[in-house]
Image (tube, rainbow, N blue to C red):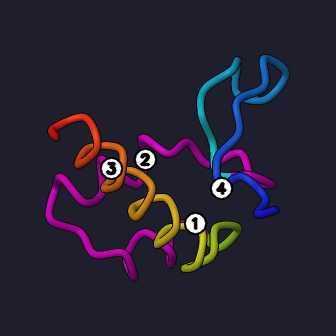
Amino acid sequence: MKKSVICRNPKIMGGTPVFSGTRVPVQTLLDYLESGESIDDFLAGFPSVNREQVIEFLEQAKDRLVATAS
């Protein structure tokens, strides 16, 4: 079974969804992408997050969006 790419814990960042094993909010990645920054820019700014986590998060988000649109 795969480890979850994001977690939510009231003791970590007040329950804000973060990348597992970090204190980096998932929203921060979305803000970077929305403003035209690249994944590489995000990873450079948040080295505790790895590329695999970002890709897995985006794939899961895509899958959920497609599933709800069907």
Q: Residues within 10 Å of mark 4 (few under 14, many from 20)?
A: some
Q: Does 59 sit above or below residue 5? A: below
Q: Residue 46: which disc?
A: 1
Q: Residue at x 23, y 69 (%)?
A: 37
Stretch of the chain drawn in magenta: 20-46
In the picture provided, is 17 more to the left or to the right than 12?
Answer: left
Q: Residue at x 50, y 75 (%)?
A: 43
Q: Position of residue 28 (x, y in %)?
A: 43, 47
Residue at label 3?
Answer: 30
Q: Does 36 sit above or below residue 69? A: below
The kind of secondary structure element at disc 3 is helix
The N terminus, quarter of image: bottom right
Q: Residue at x 60, y 26 (%)?
A: 16
The kind of secondary structure element at disc 2 is helix
Q: Is residue 8 magenta?
A: no
Q: Position of residue 53 (x, y in %)?
A: 59, 68
* Marker count (numbered): 4
Furthest residue toward front: 70
- Mark 1: amino acid: Phe
Q: Residue 28: which disc?
A: 2
Distance from Cα at disc 3 to Cα at disc 4? 15 Å
Distance from Cα at disc 4 to Cα at disc 1? 15 Å
- Mark 2: amino acid: Thr
- Mark 4: amino acid: Val
The answer to whether mark 1 and mark 2 are in CB contact below 8 A is yes
Q: Nearer the viewer, residue 54 or 32?
A: 54
Distance from Cα at disc 2 to Cα at disc 4? 15 Å
The answer to whether mark 3 and mark 2 are in CB contact below 8 A is yes
Q: Is residue 21 magenta?
A: yes
Q: Nearer the viewer, residue 3 or 26?
A: 3
